Image (spheres, grey):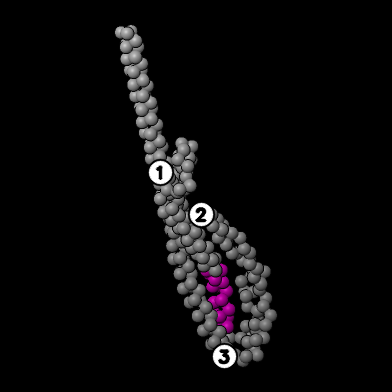
Amino acid sequence: MASTQVNPTRMELSRQKKKLVTATKGHKLLKDKRDELMRQFLDLVRENMALRERVEAGIREANKNFVVAKAGMSEETLHTAMMAPKQGVYLETGKKNIMSVDIPVFEYKTRTADENDIYSYGFAFTSSDLDDAVKSLADILPDMLKLAETEKACQLMSAEIEKTRRRVNALEHVIIPRAQANIKYITMKLDENERSTQIRLMKVKDMMLEEAHHYKERQAAAVVE
C-alpha cells in the first residue's frame, strides 16, 4: 500500500525508483549470502557431529581406562602419579572471516616437544591402564578444541543466517512492495494531473476559439451596419 506521506512529484518518483533498484540489488545479494551461509553452516554441522562422536568415544575410552587403572592401583599412588604434571598446554585464539562472520580459531602449543612428557610419573609403580587413559586424553585434545571451534562457529553462523533472513524478508515483503506501490501511486497521480492540465488547456482553447468567433461575428455585424 502506498504511503500517504509520499509527495506525488517527479523528483519523488525518481527517488522511489532509485530506492527500488537499490533494494532489488540488495535483496539479491542478501539471498545469495543467505544461501552460501546455509551451505557452509550445513557443512559445519556435519563436521561438528563427526567431531562430537569421536570426542565422546575418546572420553568414554579414557574414563574406562581410568576406572580400570584405579581398580588396580591404590588411591594414594594414583593421586601421587597425577600430582605434578610435566607437560603444559598453551591455548592461542584467533579468528577467520566467513561471509562477514568472525569464526574463532583455536590452536594449542605444548611446553615441550617430547610426546612422553604427558606422563607425569614413572612407570615402575603404575599400571599400563593409566598410561592408556592419559594417552587417550592426549589424543582427543585436538578434536576437543576443534569441536569447541566448530560449535561456536555454528552458533555464530546460525545467528547471522537468522539476521540475514530477517533482512531478506523485510526487503521482499515490506520495502520492495512499498516502493513499487509508491511508484504506482505517484505515476497515477502525475498522469491524473497531466490529464487535468490537458483538459483545462482544451477548455481554455475552446473558450478562446469561441471568443474569437464571437469577435468575428461582432466585426461582421458592424460592417453590415
- Point out the tag, 1 or 3, that comes first from the N-terminus: 3
Mark 1 sits on what residue? 185
Q: Is residue 103 magenta?
A: no
Q: Nearer the viewer, residue 170 or 11?
A: 11
Magenta segment, principal secondary structure?
helix
Tell me: residue 126, above or below residue 218: below
- Mark 2 and 3 residues: CB-CB less than 8 Å, in contact? no
**Amino acid type assigned to the residue bearing label 2 in the image:** Met
Q: Nearer the viewer, residue 60 or 214?
A: 214
- Mark 1 and 3 residues: CB-CB less than 8 Å, in contact? no
Residue at the far front in the pictured view: 225
Q: Pinpoint residue 179: horizontal percent, then vertical percent.
A: 43, 46
Q: Secondary structure at mark 2?
A: loop
Q: Residue at x 40, y 50 (%)?
A: 1
Q: Pinpoint residue 51: horizontal percent, then vertical percent.
A: 48, 69
- Counting every numbered tag in the picture gives 3
Q: Is residue 143 magenta?
A: yes
Mark 2 sits on what residue? 99
Q: Which residues are magenta?
A: 129-147
Mark 3 sits on what residue? 72
Q: CA distance from mark 1 to mark 2?
A: 38 Å
Q: Is residue 140 left or right of residue 179?
A: right
Tell me: residue 18, above or below residue 38: above
- Point out the tag, 1 or 2, that comes first from the N-terminus: 2
**Amino acid type assigned to the residue bearing label 3 in the image:** Gly
Tell me: residue 128, above or below residue 28: below
**Amino acid type assigned to the residue bearing label 1 in the image:** Tyr
